[in-house]
Every structure is written in structure tokens, then in C-alpha cells.
Amino acid sequence: MNIRAAAASCAAALMLAGCAAALNGETQPIYISTAPEVKANCVCSNDRGQWPVQTPGAVLVKRSGSVLAIRCEKPGWQNATAYLTPRLSQTAMIGSMMPYVGIVEAAVDGSTGAAMEYPSSYAVSLKPDATVTAAPSPAPAPLPSNTAAASPN
């Protein structure tokens, strides 16, 4: 291999380094909803940070190779937690198959988490909180008693 070909290969590898980071970015929007109730307060978190969202709503999270935990709470409902596992994005998969570039791309995208992606939306199930007691219903009014003696006819 001559010097020009080697230099061209190195230049191409450096330009394409972090291909998924350049194409996908280091953040990803995720639409979070809760069922059967809305307006739950949720916090999404992974090893790169925490992001609050009220449902239904979209939140911008940093991509990572770690699991994304979604913790939701709403008065009258049990707290719920869901876990989203990241998957290798198509862009990263294709880039990793390219000779020479794949090694550099994997190092850059692996360190930023850009090679991974979470599902684009998720619904967290909420269950009623059994420990919350309903307001007691008022006691029924006593029936009027007949104190008058029955008169014989």
C-alpha cells in the first residue's frame, strides 16, 4: 500500500469516526405515557443523567449503553418503574461493518452512547394504591320508629 492510499484511508476513517454520533446525535427523544391515568410525574434516568417528564409527554434523554429506568408516581396510585434496554442502532451496525472505520467508530460511539438507542415510546402501567382508603360513606339515617300503640278497631 503506498503512502497516498494509507493517508486517504486514515483521513476517511477520521472523517467518519463517530458516524452514529454524527448521524443520530448523543440524545434521543422518547414519548412516555401512563395508563390508565395521565399527569403522572416521571423521572427517566441512566448512567448519563436524569430527566423529568409529566405524562403524556416527550423527554430528551442522553443515549447510553445502560438501561433507562422510568420511575412514575401519582397520588392515589402505586409507584411504578419500567426499564428500557438499549439496542445497537442501524447506523452504528452499518458503520461497524466498514473496514478500518469500524474500530474507530466503535470507540467514539461506544464512549458517547451514540451507537445505542432506546424504544421511541413507552407506556408505564399504573395500579391503584390499595392503602389509600376511600372517604367513608355517611351512615344511613335511622328509620323513624312508631311509638304510638296500634289502636284496635
Image (cartoon, grey):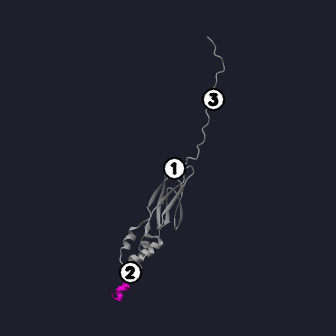
How many angstroms separate mark 1 from mark 2 (CA)? Answer: 54 Å
How many angstroms separate mark 1 from mark 3 (CA)? Answer: 37 Å
Q: Which residue is mark 2?
A: 12
Using the image, determine if residue 96 lies above or below residue 57.
below
The three-letter amino acid code for the residue at tag 2 is Ala
Q: Closer to the camera, 106 or 60? A: 106
- Horizontal and vertical percent position of residue 69: 50, 61
Q: Main secondary structure of the magenta part?
A: helix
- Horizontal and vertical percent position of residue 78: 54, 51
Image quadrant of residue 103? Answer: bottom left
Q: Which residues are magenta?
A: 1-12
- Horizontal and vertical percent position of residue 2: 34, 88
CB within 8 Å, label 1 to label 3: no
The three-letter amino acid code for the residue at tag 3 is Pro
Q: Which residue is mark 1?
A: 127
Sequence-wise first label, 2 or 3: 2
Q: What crowding class fits label 1: few (fewer than 14 Cα within 10 Å), some (14-19), or many (20 or more)?
A: few
